[in-house]
Amino acid sequence: MAFEGLADRLQSTLQKIRGKGKLTEADVNEMMREIRLALLEADVNFKVVKDFIKRVKERAIGQEILQSLTPGQQVVKIVHDELKQLMGGEQSKIAVASKPPTVIMMVGLQGAGKTTTTGKLANHLRKQLNRKPLLVAADIYRPAAINQLQTLGKQLSLPVFSLGDKVSPVEIAKQAIEKAKEEHQDYVLIDTAGRLHIDEELMQELVDVKEAVKPDEIYLVVDAMTGQDAVNVADNFNEQLDITGVILTKLDGDTRGGAALSIREVTDKPIKFVGMGEKMDALEPFHPERMASRILG
Ligand code: GDP
């Protein structure tokens, strides 16, 4: 299960102080050392850990806490609060364009789960939000990416727009939006090309699509199993594309959790959804509050 190590360590650290009637500054310092190590071991970004510890410590050694009758419980609450803030505080919703269709560009590196997630998101829009999405096959380089999206479309009974692999992604995206207007689809999900590594050509192509269609959302799909690499990828894509959100896949695996806890703080962009499996219904809106509760038990 994801976050298992982190959850165990944080829970046992907090357990030690939970029922304490009196808490000294030394107790708080000792606890902070343990939390810091637990976060670093969970592969949370070094600077994120440092700032997090500083914030918790400042609040935890405030006089009203040390002198309170239930200081342990209050410190647990502070850690919970700060974990929630670290992951963005409130749940972040999908944009709705003032004039349909709402255009969402899906970007990411190959293998992150972009095409699968495009299908899942379309399924979510239809099933949970009662919307009519159009899937757009604009990943013209990866062999089989177009087929993969068409297969997903068939499975979900949702339309897929494709012009094959000889037309530019910009042209595909533009024509898809026209088609969606004609057919009254209210969301357009563009599955763009991924590469094995970030390179200039990839970014330029994504920038070109962005400028041509002015998407309402740009979601970066990253693999939670890749830890700090996922955070670096997010930082890089965000710098060049000014993404609007992140979808973190493979959270059903045994990821230590570093990416989920670092991405918001490093990029200042929210995690919108998490992928919890390979099936089309395995996509969940990301709730910082629930995630913090899950980690702290
Ligand atoms: P793309 O190259 O980024 O388009 O990646 P794909 O969509 O082809 O996905 C790569 C692999 O990751 C596939 O085998 C997917 O089934 C798998 N995958 C995607 N999302 C998840 C997820 O949330 N959990 C799990 N376990 N596997 C996933």
Image (spheres, rainbow, N blue to C red):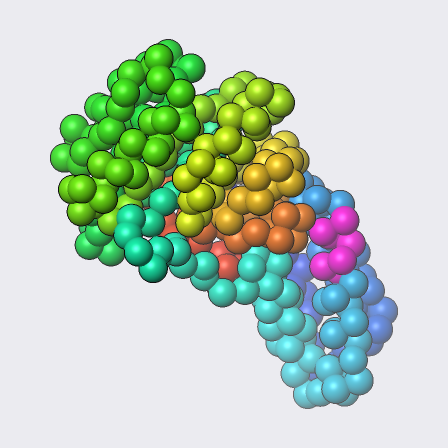
Q: Quadrant of residue 17?
A: bottom right
| 51 part of magenta stretch | yes
Q: Quadrant of residue 23?
A: bottom right
What is the number of callouts on the image?
A: 0
Compared to residue 172, the image places residue 256 above or below, namely below
Image coordinates for residue 264, horizontal then vertical, percent: 60, 52
Question: Which of the two residues, 18 or 66, is positioned nearer the viewer here?
Answer: 66
Image coordinates for residue 212, horizontal then vertical, percent: 44, 36
Q: Does 140 sit left or right of 221 as displayed? A: left
Residue 221 at least partly seen = no
Compared to residue 57, the image places residue 154 above or below, namely above
Question: Which of the two residues, 109 or 63, is positioned nearer the viewer here?
Answer: 109
The extreme right residue here reads 26
Q: Does 297 sit left or right of 268 as displayed? A: left
Image coordinates for residue 175, horizontal then vertical, percent: 29, 31
Compared to residue 121, the image places residue 198 above or below, namely above
| 161 part of magenta stretch | no
Residue at 75%, 86% in the rendered image: 64
Residue at 29%, 48% in the rendered image: 101
Q: Quadrant of residue 77?
A: bottom right
Residue at 57%, 31% in the rendered image: 226
Question: Which of the two residues, 100 or 228, is positioned nearer the viewer here?
Answer: 100
Which segment did they paint magenta?
Answer: 47-53
Majority SS type along the magenta span: helix
